[in-house]
Amino acid sequence: MKTFLVFLVSGLASSVIGLAQQPAARTPTAPPPINWPSPALPGGPIMVETAIERQVQVTVTKGLNQPFSMAFLPDGGILITERAGRLRIVRNGVLDPAPVAGVPQVHAQGIGGLMDLALHPRFAENQWVYFTYHKLVDEKSLGRITLARGRWDGKALAEVRDLFSATQSGNASRIIFGRDGMLYMTVGIGDPPAALRAQDPNDLAGKVLRLRDDGTVPADNPFVGRAGYRPEIYTLGHRNALGLAVNPETGAIWECENGPNGGDEVNILQAGKNYGWPVVSYGRFYLGPRVSVNPWREEMEPPLVFWVPAIAVSGMTFYTGDKFPNWKNHLFVGGMRQGEVPRSGHLERIDFNAKWEELHREGMLRELQQRIRDVRQGPDGLLYLLTAENDGALLRMEPEHKN
Amino acid sequence: MKTFLVFLVSGLASSVIGLAQQPAARTPTAPPPINWPSPALPGGPIMVETAIERQVQVTVTKGLNQPFSMAFLPDGGILITERAGRLRIVRNGVLDPAPVAGVPQVHAQGIGGLMDLALHPRFAENQWVYFTYHKLVDEKSLGRITLARGRWDGKALAEVRDLFSATQSGNASRIIFGRDGMLYMTVGIGDPPAALRAQDPNDLAGKVLRLRDDGTVPADNPFVGRAGYRPEIYTLGHRNALGLAVNPETGAIWECENGPNGGDEVNILQAGKNYGWPVVSYGRFYLGPRVSVNPWREEMEPPLVFWVPAIAVSGMTFYTGDKFPNWKNHLFVGGMRQGEVPRSGHLERIDFNAKWEELHREGMLRELQQRIRDVRQGPDGLLYLLTAENDGALLRMEPEHKN
């Protein structure tokens, strides 16, 4: 803690200022990011090699702008959010040129905007579509992360209303329904000094929240009734959480988050636990100093999986289908890192032993050189991906030889 | 960009053959390694893209078998060790088909054999060539890591004799001369239970040694005269150290070593310090469990740079030349990792701020899909690499437009 405070005074506060004023030249103390744009994807199907499923065919549906998340409708349509605030639909592999109506006004600034999307577990009965977005407060400030719901009427969202208003933060928000029927929602935060909010139990930034499907607080949340604690909080101490998935065997909620320079993490969420940001981390601040000399603390949860250097993790899912039998129960994580490790926007596969301890990682789709924003399993057992690009695309991965 | 895509197409086709030979079953508790052979390199010069020096031309000299190390002779020749026990020479970009005479019998088994190579700092006066190798003890056991020296007579090694006999270990040995004129020598070790030797101060395995140029112990070594400590030891607690370099500004010896699954490290060596293996590590054992829950301990040195997942670090050098001005004082590390992160045999570049804190990493040459065993700067200011392949090669990297 002593070390951390020293960083705060000498390094961290100045790092925020320094980063905002990056000069064009590359000096040892002020590293500018490397701009390495992704090439255009080919239009036709692409054959890619993978380590244990061999040849995989990737089908490309273009025309999306910075897509963020997707949801599979029972009628076969795929709803896709675009960060700037549009909801799109793909039917039979074809993107409808007209956006889906019903999305409220979104404040899309920086990495904010229209974010995640999830169908209610009883969608067949209630047709509820949940989504998160940044709501305008005023033009000068970051938007307010908001959970909303609408009813899918077959063509558009109807009866849209905000369910929960979290906090002002420029960082992203994922949502997922757990097996308990509750909705888990991430609220990200960046580097210090703002990052200290992740350790403040009276602030929703840098937390994963747990809510009922109407946006209210479940009575069994870990901090309900505790003074100085927001009752919506499920877990604390997260940086920018961009992935949530339900473990198919244990039912636990797995979360992944972007670290600073190094220190991307996958965590298994446990009610009331603290995941350490920005007190402990495996990463470094962008100007060089370690976030913490010791990346571990007794009262904080170490990540299950971490990346040094960071791959800029994003959407995440477990594969549970039958189309890729060698990938059963493996974790797939989108990687958005580009520039400093050129051509590394990719999809990462991780497999585990029976105790959910990591065995292998495989980086695939590197040859496409696309940032991968989201990965989901479709009802057809295939894997679907979204690229985090202005000329974004929906990618469908299927075995070379169909069964 | 096109060059890169062409490479993937031609390269990946040949990889498929190797993949077909791996076992189909993949059980959670006994992960087989993935066999993903490197494709053949093209013969002609290759253009590769890099992040801050952009187009770089790579010239290929083929015909080497598992080359391990190289040394630049004042007459322009490049001496190269092959692990099986041969010393080779390249003159004017052409590999002499006849091996250089004078190398003693080498016990090349597993990852042992003829290892590193270094010229004496006053080579112009004494023509001394230093090298390390595994010496046969008996056919059933690992060889004994041995430091030897010969005199370069212009065509061969003469007056070859062993200077120092370290210990039996299957793991590799690098050597380098420091600015203090002393020779630093690594003696690797693997996983537990053998790994416990790395913490035993009366055992040379898992250590970096410091010797005089005649193989004797300098009087100012940190443990001279201390009971229960081998006086040759400079630092303790290393796994398989495969890289050594002298920092061009500070003069400190930098070392890099292979971790287990995750946990490759770069360390700055300080006399008498303990670098933690196998007590603390950022990695996991191959069956899944963490080496240590907390990768940090008060009395042990954390790495300056580490990789999770591991890239299988090998030879390492600082670039100090003028041919690539944007790479000045950057660290280059060879990466030999293949299979689980396919096509990732590569060269890694790391730059630092004025305090030698890490700023960026760049993985380059991934498109070649070659394991990089060693990297050195030539007297011409260009970068030279060796590939850790049976059809191994010497690679020379130079700017696209020569000055």
Image (tube, coloured by chain):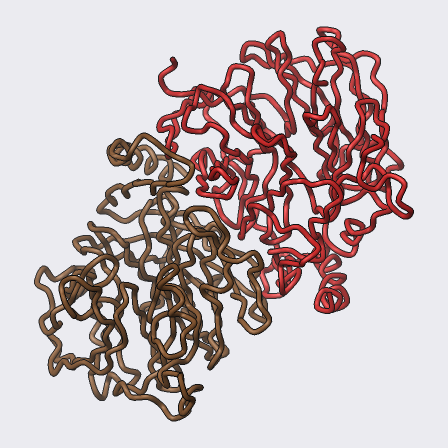
Chain colours: A red, B brown
Apparent side of residue A171 relative to residue B161 in the rendered image (left or right): right
Quadrant of the frame with the N terminus of chain A = bottom right
Q: Is residue B241 above or below residue A147?
A: below
Q: Residue A129's spot in the image, x, y percent?
A: 74, 18
Q: Residue B51's spot in the image, x, y percent?
A: 48, 51
Residue depicted at x 66% and y 60%? A291
Q: Is residue B110 above or below residue A374?
A: below
- Residue A390 sits in quarter: top right
Residue depicted at x 27% and y 63%? B170
- Residue B334 sits in quarter: bottom left
Q: Nearer the viewer, residue B402 or A19?
A: A19
Total marks placed: 0
Residue depicted at x 69% and y 22%? A118
Quadrant of the frame with the C terminus of chain A = top left
Residue depicted at x 74% and y 28%? A114
Q: Nearer the viewer, residue A27 or A240?
A: A240
Q: Can residue B88 be seen by looking at this rendering?
A: no
Q: Residue A239's spot in the image, x, y percent?
A: 70, 47
Q: Residue A106's spot in the image, x, y percent?
A: 80, 28
Q: Can residue A397 be seen by looking at this rendering?
A: yes
- Residue B150 sits in quarter: bottom left
Apparent side of residue A333 relative to residue B204 in the rendered image (left or right): right
